Image (cartoon, rainbow, N blue to C red):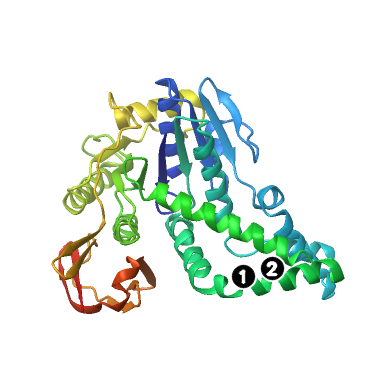
Amino acid sequence: MRIILFTGKGGVGKTTIAAATAIKAAAAGYKTLIISTDPAHSLSDALDKELQPEPVEVSENLYAQELDVYYSMKKYWGNIRQLMLTVFKWQGVKNVMAEEMSALPGMEEASAFLWIEKFYTEKQYDLIVIDSAPTGETLTLLTLPQVTKWWVTKALPLQKFAIRNVGRVARYTTGIPLDKGYEELENIFDKLETIQKIFGDPSISSIRIVTNAERMVINESKRAYTYLSLYGYNVDALIVNRLLQEEGSGSFFEQYYKTQQKYLREIEDSFSELPIFKAQHIGTEVFGAELLMKIADTIYRDDDPTTVFHQEAPIEVKENLNRYNVRVKLPLLEGEEFELNKFGDELVIQLHNRRQTIFLPRFVNFYQLKTYSFDAPYLNVELGK
């Protein structure tokens, strides 16, 4: 199975590119599922089909799904949801408000992972295409397993015995399913850790950044590439969308075309190590299979869209005598400051408002952070006794 996630700044045409990719793959014979994790849910508009919170068959080999957090809560978080509703109602919160508050922060992102874990485990599809939310929300989605792993390894095990035993008493005396909710939470954490490993495997999962030839969009694409590498995810392509075809002298779009060409050269210089695909603006609103296939053909031409176009391990840990060398790729990071700390078996990199925790082998718990250096685009860290 292949998993391809599309991300980019809001408004770049990410949903169109994701849908076009899915349609071309399905036409090539791959049983394909496209999932929208974007709360705006424009996938149904792009496909010109009404979608549901469960997969719907759109055409031969093509299925589509728009996630709904409340539907997913009922499907995956029965005991947790009941626990939250009971607690809120017990404290006097009205029913409608209790329902809204029971959707805890992160549940929408977690539900996306749980669906993907389900489909991956069951091997129902050859390809899963993910039309994700804009870049910031995508980073929240992709870092969720690391956050939950920290909680389950550092905080929850200390309270496991107490929660299970006190929870049984609470369930029998108050009706609050604390122990069942905890068991369900543990199961979710295990699945999130599984899907993190799947997303971290570049032979299975790829991320494709969709951008436009505009300054603000390019800058966000650069940041996204840096952060995705920081978190250990493989970016296998950049897709430049809505490029104008050459306009004659004096035409209305002549200056805009020239500006696009200038920024396109910047994109090719900045992302030179990545395959760069270009999607021409076809001069009309894009929805429906026929127009989406036209877009897909301008992007991939004769290439198989499921191909892993670029593969690199952004994080490497190697043994060197009695020391360990950690190498983290941070592309497009020039002259920017970051902070590096080691706590036990964790290496913590702070870059702007993003923090990455790299879990090292447990035996390096007593190793010290000796030196580190940044030789663009790699951060090199040496650990020793």
Instruction: Residue under label 2, please give it.
Output: 164
Mark-to-mark CA distance, 1 and 2: 6 Å
- Splitting the image into 4 quarters, where does residue 110 fall? bottom right
Q: Residues within 10 Å of mark 2 (few under 14, many from 20)?
A: some
Q: Residue at x 31, y 48 (%)?
A: 235
Residue 338 shows in this picture: yes
Image height of 250 relative to 220, above or below: above
Q: Is residue 302 left or right of residue 371?
A: right
Q: Residue at x 48, y 43 (%)?
A: 131
Q: Residue at x 32, y 65 (%)?
A: 361
Q: Secondary structure at mark 1?
A: helix
Q: Position of residue 315 (x, y in %)?
A: 27, 58
Q: Position of residue 353 (x, y in %)?
A: 39, 73
Instruction: Residue under label 1, please give it.
Output: 160
Asked if disc 1 and disc 2 are in contact, CB closer than 8 Å, the reply is yes
**Mark 2: amino acid:** Arg
**Mark 1: amino acid:** Lys
Q: Is residue 91 left or right of residue 32?
A: right
The one nearer the camera, 147 or 162, is 162
Residue 341 shows in this picture: no
